Amino acid sequence: MDYSGVLIFRNEFASLRLIIHGEGSAAISDFYSRKRRKGYGSSLLKEVISFADQNNLFLLLEARPYGPGKNNDNTHLVKLYERFGFKVHSIGRKPTQLMIRKSGGA
């Protein structure tokens, strides 16, 4: 994909920004779901992954907790993203970890 820019994906209760770098990579940023554990975030993530696969983009994100009551444990986030084909690329200082998903989930 030769496009560089920012796309906003959203549904009723979740939203995220996809920052396309133009060299075959894109970063997921500001991923937020107002209703957790209801499938809204997962549904949105599936849509973004489909877009990335269709455009042969690998995805980057930082697994980092947010919102009220957040703590320094991102284990549940890492497990969530791993279910969608992301792999931990580097272990940063907790609570942040860089994760990558290659096009097609490979």
Image (cartoon, rainbow, N blue to C red):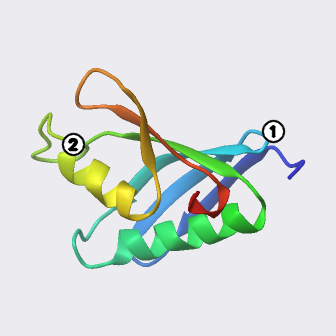
Q: Quadrant of residue 94?
A: top left
x and y percentages locating residue 49 in the rendered image: 58, 65
Tell me which amino acid carries mark 1. Glu
Earlier along the polypeptide chain: callout 1 or callout 2?
1
Up the image or down, 93 lies above or below 1; here it is: above
Query: What SS does tag 1 mark?
Result: loop
Q: Is residue 92 visible?
A: yes
Tags 1 and 2 in contact by the CB under 8 Å rule? no
Q: Residues within 10 Å of mark 2 (few under 14, many from 20)?
A: some
Query: What SS does tag 2 mark?
Result: loop
Residue at image point 85% right, 53% down: 1
Q: Which dot marks residue 74?
A: 2
Q: Which dot marks residue 67?
A: none
Residue at image point 33% right, 23% down: 92
Q: Nearer the viewer, residue 89 or 24?
A: 89
Q: Is residue 13 visible?
A: no
Image quadrant occupied by the C terminus: bottom right
Q: Residues within 10 Å of mark 1 (few under 14, many from 20)?
A: few
Up the image or down, 51 lies above or below 64; here it is: below
x and y percentages locating residue 88 in the rendered image: 40, 39
x and y percentages locating residue 55 in the rendered image: 78, 61
Q: CA distance from mark 1 to mark 2?
A: 29 Å
Residue at image point 22% right, 72% down: 37
Q: Nearer the viewer, residue 101 or 19?
A: 101
x and y percentages locating residue 16 in the rendered image: 50, 57
Tell me which amino acid carries mark 2. Asn
Up the image or down, 13 lies above or below 5; here it is: below
Q: Quadrant of residue 95?
A: top left
Outermost residue, right side: 2
Q: Which dot marks residue 23?
A: 1
